[in-house]
Amino acid sequence: IFTFLVILSVILIALNMSIHKKTDYLVKFKSKDIVSIIIDSQEGQIIIHKGKPNTEYEWVVEHEGKTKRMDNRAMLAYFSTITHIESVEKFPLSDFQPTQIDQLFGSDSGGKIALKLSTGKKIILTIGRTTPSGTELYAALTEDPEIVYTIPNRYELLLFPSFLKLQSR
């Protein structure tokens, strides 16, 4: 009976693990690895970089000639959003015609987020238009140029905050 219970427990654990889908995040680095960010959207360009180290306002935001020191907690929350973007689906770039790619990631679509990491690596996340279902956005990464991703559309507002929204976080 003991052996049977052990085998049954192992089977139940394996079934439970296969039922719960592991979340697949779009980027594979930690928030603490971010050194600077350039956000390009329809609202203009926002530059976020390190300011005075080991202070409450370690981060600096620049937008339209204005500079503002930012609270570390607000910035870490924003960085956490970036590092926890869930990938819904991914498609080979070859599934799309060149004209479709232009439509998905045209100049009036979401925008771009350029990240510089402490390793020196640079990653550009491009957010495109909404999918036909309306529940996701198309996304692309420079580190994976042959793949088009879809991500939940809730990230559009979270990833491209206006300068004032970013300050009031």
Image (spheres, rainbow, N blue to C red):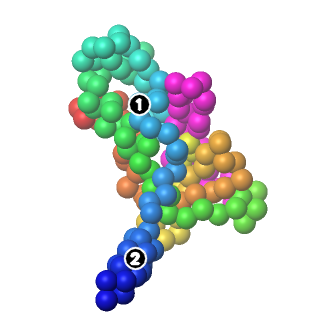
Residue at which label 2 appears? 10
| Disc 2 packing (10 Å; few <14; some 14–19; many ≥20) | few
Mark linked to residue 32: 1
Asked whether residue 45 appears in the rendered view, the answer is no
Marks 2 and 1 in Cβ contact (< 8 Å) = no
Look at 72% across and 66% down and name the residue there: 95
Label 1: element kind: helix
C-alpha span from label 2 to label 1 = 37 Å
Q: Position of residue 94 (x, y in %)?
A: 76, 62
* Tag 2: amino acid: Val
Q: What's the magenta region?
A: 100-124
- Foreground residue among 125 and 97: 125
Left or right, 7 with respect to 148, comes to left
Label 2: element kind: helix
Q: Would residue 160 be counted in the magenta stretch?
A: no
Q: Quadrant of the C terminus?
A: top left
Q: Quadrant of residue 61?
A: top left
Look at 43% across and 75% down and name the residue there: 14
Q: Position of residue 10 (x, y in %)?
A: 40, 76
In the figure, 4 relative to 32: above or below? Answer: below
Left or right, 118 with respect to 96, comes to left
In the figure, 137 relative to 65: above or below? Answer: below
* Tag 1: amino acid: Lys
- Foreground residue among 85 and 32: 32
Look at 33% across and 17% down and name the residue there: 58
